[in-house]
Image (cartoon, rainbow, N blue to C red):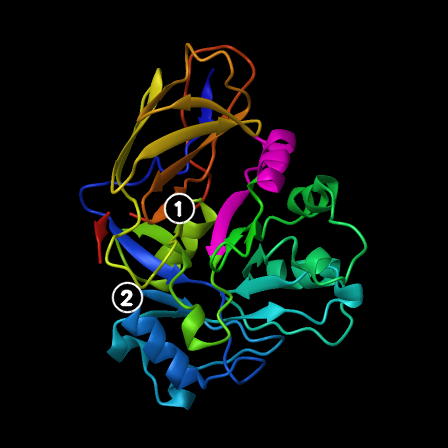
Amino acid sequence: MPLTIDPYSAVNWETFHQYKASLHGHTDESDGTKTPAQMIDAWIAAGYDIVAITDHDHVTWPWTDFDRDPEELGLLAIQGQEMSNVEAHRHHTASLFNSWVGTTGYTLETAYAAIQAVNGVAVMAHPGNRYARGWVDDPYPPSFYANFFSTYSCLLGFDICVRDGLFIVTDLWDALLEQLMPSRPVWGFGMDDSHELTSIGFTYVVVLSDELSTAKIKSALQAGQHYVCYDHDASVLTPPPIITEISVNTTKIEITATNYAEIRWISNGKIIELGESLSIVENTKLKKYVRAEIEGENGIIYTNPWGFDSVHHAPRPRPIDIPSANPTMR
């Protein structure tokens, strides 16, 4: 099938860095148990390169107010907050690269429109949490999410995995990709949603970029130029899988990785192939998208999806139309 979306097409695997990112975490400025300085120190100790403090409806910014200078620490700090005071608890969202804060009872529509107006980005936080906590009577159907993704370009994706596997919603992700791809990709994210020191380092995003700058990292996230890592046990020495290269041509997608036992290729929610490569010409089970899961002894990686046109013509891969950010692990 003709490949039309390749989130990794701009990545130079020999020169790009793989930056470890925490895009959702809390301090005692909202409902966290530790000060911003204590949390920042813990993220540094856990090897993070990028950190967004997302206190509830509160922008904990700048870090220098808490005696921590991200530039001196060698970190990229991202301004943001977690939209939580949404009417009827409809859905929490990590709002990033902006300072917008809504008043109590604002709607998701109002919030996404405001974030989009200030050129921010948003990631829907922990789907399934609303239902598990009894805040809604039933889990939201895919159509609930599809409506927002179809309407607001600032909305990049949602958490497919939270903390130590507390919520894993790849089934919802597959349902959305089946409905929206390839015209509207939905990127996968993973976050610890840290509220204390012991909940750091389990689930994170690995961003692929040649530079640790706000502009380049934001652009990479918008383009889906990242993957999610769920580290089963951050305290053990066995590392989770790491992608070292992804190669794509007109006939196949191939992944090279370390520390893994199995690579699964998934389309329409079903495993369609096992192994390092997938034929995009011969595999008859391939539908409008495919994504890969790379599992090892101590973790699993989720790639972002590739998209395919149902019309059979000469393949012409193209990246997402986002300003280019031109992986060596930091």
- Front-lying residue, 277 or 117: 277
Q: In this view, does 5 lie to the left or right of 276?
A: right
- Front-lying residue, 297 or 183: 297
Assign a secondary structure to mark 1: strand
Q: What residue type is labelled 1?
A: Tyr
Q: In this view, does 137 lie above or below 23?
A: above
User: Which residue bears the numbered disc 2?
Assistant: 47
- Check residue 226 for magenta coloring: no
Q: Quadrant of residue 293?
A: top left
Question: Callout 2: few (<14), some (14-19), or many (20+) C-alpha neighbours within 10 Å?
Answer: few
Assign a secondary structure to mark 2: loop
| Residue sitting at x 47%, y 63% | 192
Q: Gap between marks 1 and 2, in whole Å? A: 17 Å
- Check residue 180 for magenta coloring: yes
| Residue sitting at x 46%, y 63% | 23
Q: What residue type is labelled 2?
A: Gly
User: Which residue bears the numbered disc 1?
Assistant: 227
Q: What stretch is highlighted in magenta?
A: 171-190
Q: In this view, does 45 lie to the left or right of 82?
A: left
